[in-house]
Amino acid sequence: MTIDSRTRWLALIVLCLGDLMIVLDTTIVNVALPSIREDLGFSQASLAWVVNAYVLTFGGFMLLGGRLGDLFGHRRLFVLGVALFTLASLGCGIAGSQDVLVGARAVQGLGGAIVAAVALSLIMNLFTEPAERAKAMGVIGFVAAGGGSIGVLLGGALTDVLDWHWVFLVNLPVGVAVCALCLVLLPGGRGQGSSGRLDVGGAVTVTASLMLAVYAIVNGNEAGWTSGRTLGLLASSVALLALFLAIEARVASPLVPLGLFRLRNVATANVIGALWSAAMFAWFFLAALYLQLVLGYRPFEVGLAFLPANLIMGAFSLGLSARLVIRFGIRAPLVTGMLLVSVGVALFARAPVDGSFLLDVLPSMTVLGLGVGMAMSPVLLAAMSDVSPEESGLASGIVNTAFMMGGALGLAVLASISASRTDSLRASGDGVLSALNGGYHAAFLVGAGFALAAAVLGAVLLRPTEATAIEPAPVAAAG
């Protein structure tokens, strides 16, 4: 089924709304955590599971969600994921106990994994002309990159004006509208891989491996990185991953065809995505902590502080990025953008205890906005453009998994570096704020190193591709 240009762009807006709900939920809750703790009686340790339950299922089910989209239709899985996420949001919003909230958050993560895993494949199959595809990927790239800081702004406003329940309930009208509009605007279908079979063994082993890895990572700082529990979980995750690879090499219809990783741009883009995500998580979370704990900003003011970066990202993602890709291909904008991200994160490593917004925050936000806006679309295009429609959902799941795992691991490692440096400075006699800020500086420098490594990999390994050579996959129904 073919659809006209106007309908495609309307469909993109709807897909972005669905994806934005998922991206927002990774940060909008953080602002409300103190209120949730007080209302439901969480301890400091158990409160972390309001976030971790979501991250655990989100990271664990991404690959499976992408493959199911290929098998049973991308539209069908996208609507299912949005519906599941919306119902779980209702459960979170009316939760009156810790167990109900944490359980509903886990279901939210499952729905979010399905949505994130198939959204890119829907866009790739809707937009087959190179220039339009570059523009569409720029739009979804802006949602992915800017949604987190929008979540802080919205979360602060909802928590201040109403209460914490509304950070979840706000999803309900959006989710219902997205489901209804998807059924109207997106063509249906069984999916390009509907004749294949689900690799149950591969699905079970890789999902268990990812969930164990995420669990070990998000609890690494609390349990200790060299503790028996953390090392045991990581070892189990590696063993399951090895078993998964053995299954994939032998099964007739593998969940993840290993030949996919022989596509140089696909493999390189996923490594770059993981490194970049680690750097961006460092910037977003640690910058928010610096603004709140060192400069004394309120949650809503933190959201406002991130607006310059979001506006610049938007200007690039919604037009300029596509023009750069059309003019220079994907490698040059990606490498330049990554270098700017590295510089932007590094600038935060010089922000003083008595810093000002204009001198110490705005320059970093500006450079980061330029870098992210320039590089996001090329990263997504590199990860998806060499893949056939039959495997587009899987490729989408893989790149989202790379972002998720890179961000989770990067944040855990950088938080550990920050805490260790802070403790060291406190032991040397530094004041509380000075030591805290010194810890953030150390983490920012390592995060800048991640982004620099991503730029180097892009320059060395990414296959030069003219925009006109970003060949569209054969026209397919976005099922």
Image (cartoon, rainbow, N blue to C red):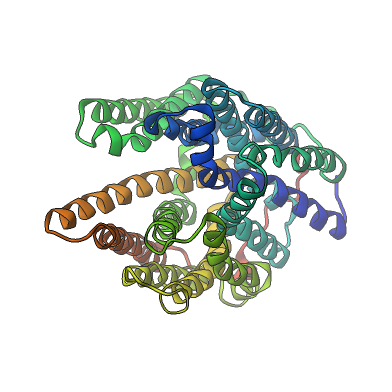
User: In the rendered image, which quarter is residue 237 located in?
Assistant: top left
- Residue 181 horizontal/vertical position (percent): 84, 43
Residue located farthest toward the left when viewing the structure as drawn:
428
Of 208 and 198, the residue lying toward us: 208
Q: Is residue 61 visible?
A: yes
Q: Quadrant of the N terminus?
A: top right
What is the tally of numbered marks visible in this picture? Answer: 0
> Does residue 139 appear to the left or right of 212 in the view shown?
right
> Does residue 231 appear to the left or right of 52 in the view shown?
left
User: In the rendered image, which quarter is residue 443 located in?
Assistant: bottom left
Of 36 and 30, the residue lying toward us: 36
> Does residue 284 appear to the left or right of 183 in the view shown?
left
The residue at the point 45 percent across, 31 percent down is 49
Q: Is residue 256 visible?
A: no
> Does residue 222 appear to the left or right of 161 in the view shown?
left
Check the image and report above or below for 270 versus 464.
Answer: above
The residue at the point 75 percent across, 53 percent down is 12
- Residue 446 horizontal/vertical position (percent): 29, 60
- Residue 403 horizontal/vertical position (percent): 47, 48
Q: Quadrant of the C terminus?
A: top right
Check the image and report above or below for 441 versus 156.
Answer: below
The residue at the point 55 percent across, 63 percent down is 378
Check the image and report above or below for 362 versus 251.
Answer: below
Of 438 and 295, the residue lying toward us: 295
- Residue 472 horizontal/vertical position (percent): 68, 57
The residue at the point 47 percent across, 61 percent down is 297
